[in-house]
Amino acid sequence: MRLKYQLFLTLLAASALLIALMYAISSWTFSRGFLEYVNKNEADRLQSVADQVAVRYAEEGNWLWVNKQSVRRLTGAPRDRRGSENAQSPKSRRGPPRRHFIIADASRKPVFGEIKADRTMQWLPISSDDEVVGFLAAPKLERVDGSFDRVFESKQRKTFGLTALAMILLSGLLSVPLAGRIVKPLLKVNKAVGEISSGNYAHRVAANRRDEIGDLAANINSLGHTLEQNRDARQRWIAEISHELRTPLAVLRGEIEAVQDGVRTMDKTALASLHTEVLSLGRLIDDLHTLSLSDVGAINYQFEPVNLAESLNLFFASHNDTLSEHAISLNLDLASGDGQFLADAQRMEQLFSNLLQNTCRYTDEGGSLYVCLSQSNATESDTSHSRLHVIDWYDSSPGVEDVALSKLFDPLYRTEMSRNREFGGAGLGLAIVKRIVEAHQGNISASHSSVGGLHIRIELPVLEGSV
């Protein structure tokens, strides 16, 4: 059954139940109230008889005068053709009481009539000279017995029933548009999901409601936006990878065809050039493979306690020739950052190597590299670690534009305008660096260097208990 009809039946059933309950309560309340009204009316009628009895008692001074004839004269009750009291005549309804009554003395002992044990009595005092000398008693009604009263009660019940049925029909009519109003935005959301599932990621739902349906529409829009970004990123990724692979392959193809056509001699120089292109292509493929494994969490890290200061010292000692080749001077400050942390030594070597390659590729010849290692307290937002190793990696000009700082760690992104593109790589080095830092539960950021180039800041957790 469709949701619209389910909501309609639910609303109708709830309304009908409430209306039926209201009808039952109203009928019961009316019946009780009407019965009390009838009893009160009868008590008012009995009071006139009690007043007359009190006058007669004051004249006689005792109850010896009480008999059927004297009581009948007091009440003025008419007789039917058989000589008996007609309690159902129209006059009896308006004048004398319709029920039999008893007269009792001050101790409630009957002097006229009989008290039935199974009936609840209402007692009216009879006073003479401000003293209670007796009582006039009559049984309370347990149900409405007068024909006029029964007809009135029946009409009221019928009116209540018809009103309840009308309210149920009205609630049914109101439930139809209400169910449609609730389901309508869900149908729009369902249509949007269908559009998105068919590949139309640009489709959006009007999320102008401030309820759960509005939240659902907003989440659907966010999902469509995310899928659209992922599709664009995937297409861009494939296009950029194809472009990066095409360049070394085109060079290889050109040199091989030159040798085949006899334009170039196959000698050591030609072989060295081909070997260089093959190595470049191999590094690109290795970087793509590493990045893809990192994205799916398939890289196996072997963590062990590592002294960060010693690792940096050993790394730069083994790569001194690389810095000399590019005429870049090195300034190390590791004194204030001594300590251990859990790391994969091989991946940390790859991290430092990628940072150094980035510096050598883009820093002007004769530039400088400053590497500072220190420790700091963790920020309030980072409650998992108390102390952090901080690596500040500064290089000299040229720098990068502000818009490029947030994109430096994106795969295949290169700052072609602000950094030298001629000697640049494929734009994967810093992306791999970020993945390695995140795998070590660290943070990485980029900003402008105080010496004119790029400032890379890396924060890594200090191993608890290490100095």
Image (cartoon, rainbow, N blue to C red):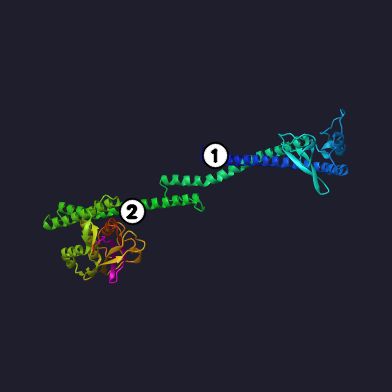
Residue 297, position as x, y percentages in the image: 28, 50
Magenta stretch: includes residue 464: yes
Magenta residues (range): 444-465
User: Pointer 1 and pointer 2: residues touching (CB < 8 Å)?
Assistant: no
Lateral position of residue 188 relative to residue 87, left or right: left
Residue pictured at 38% horizontal, 53% vertical? 229
Residue 467, position as x, y percentages in the image: 23, 64
Q: Earlier in the sequence, mark 1 or mark 2?
A: 1
Q: Quadrant of residue 85?
A: top right
- The residue indicated by pointer 2 is 236
Q: Quadrant of residue 386?
A: bottom left
Amino acid on which disc 2 is placed = Arg
Residue 186, position as x, y percentages in the image: 50, 46
Magenta stretch: includes residue 7: no
Q: Quadrant of residue 167?
A: top right
When the figure is inspected, residue 164 is found, relative to residue 311, above or below; the finding is above
- The residue indicated by pointer 1 is 5
Tag count in the figure? Answer: 2
When the figure is inspected, residue 440 is found, relative to residue 12, above or below; the finding is below
Disc number lying in front (1 or 2): 1
Q: Is residue 364 visible?
A: no
